[in-house]
Amino acid sequence: MGKQKENKRKPKREGRVVTVGKAESVPPGRGATVKLKDGTELALYNVGGTFHAIENFCPHKGYPLADSRLYGGIVECNLHGYRFDVRTGECFTKKSCGIEKYEVNVEDGMIRILI
């Protein structure tokens, strides 16, 4: 299946909350790229009104997961079909390719992610 690609644009865990935008800007069933001030990125998804965030790049070849298709709570990388659970970061394609997930809360209509 190929060598895993290191995600150099994955946010470092800092234990701080970042407000990224309005909840209404990501409709149910959709994903969005969240670019942070330091140049790192997350993929944000709205699954039936509940928001989830994972690292944005597939560990297989580095394709942006926010640009890939969402099937319920599963995102499938458009490049080679790797599948991830956006709620947990678990990879269904290959056991060793799981990705990090980040806690998301919505307060006063604003999306906040713990990084």
Image (cartoon, rainbow, N blue to C red):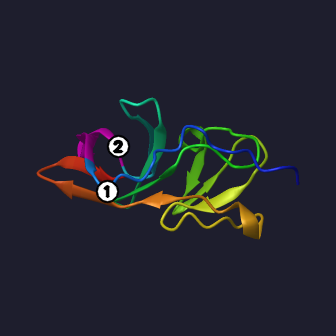
Apparent side of residue 20 relative to residue 101 in the rendered image (left or right) = left
Q: Residue furthest right?
A: 1
Between residue 97 and residue 109, name the one nearer to us.
97
Say which residue appears at 67% left-offset and 38% top-offset. 63
* Magenta run includes residue 21: yes
Residue 110 picture location, percent across and down: 19, 46
Apparent side of residue 72 relative to residue 79 in the rendered image (left or right) = left
The answer to whether residue 53 is above or below residue 20 is: below
The answer to whether residue 12 is above or below residue 47 is: above
Between residue 103 and residue 46, name the one nearer to us.
103
The answer to whether residue 38 is above or below residue 1 is: above
Say which residue appears at 76% left-offset and 63% top-offset. 93
- Total count of labels: 2
The type of residue carrying mark 2 is: Val
Say which residue appears at 61% left-offset and 43% top-offset. 57
- Quarter of the image with the N terminus in it: bottom right
> Which residue is the site of mark 2?
26
Look at the image and give the residue range highlighted in magenta: 18-27
Q: Residues within 10 Å of mark 2 (few under 14, many from 20)?
A: some
Between marks 1 and 2 in the image, the one whose residue lies nearer the viewer: 1
Tell me if label 1 and label 2 are in contact, CB under 8 Å. no
Residue 96 picture location, percent across and down: 74, 66
Apparent side of residue 1 relative to residue 44 in the rendered image (left or right) = right
Residue 17 picture location, percent across and down: 26, 51
The type of residue carrying mark 1 is: Gly
Label 2 secondary element: loop
Residue 15's disc number: 1
Residue 69 picture location, percent across and down: 60, 47
Between residue 42 and residue 84, name the one nearer to us.
42
* Magenta run includes residue 31: no
Distance from the alpha carbon under mark 1 to that under mark 2: 24 Å
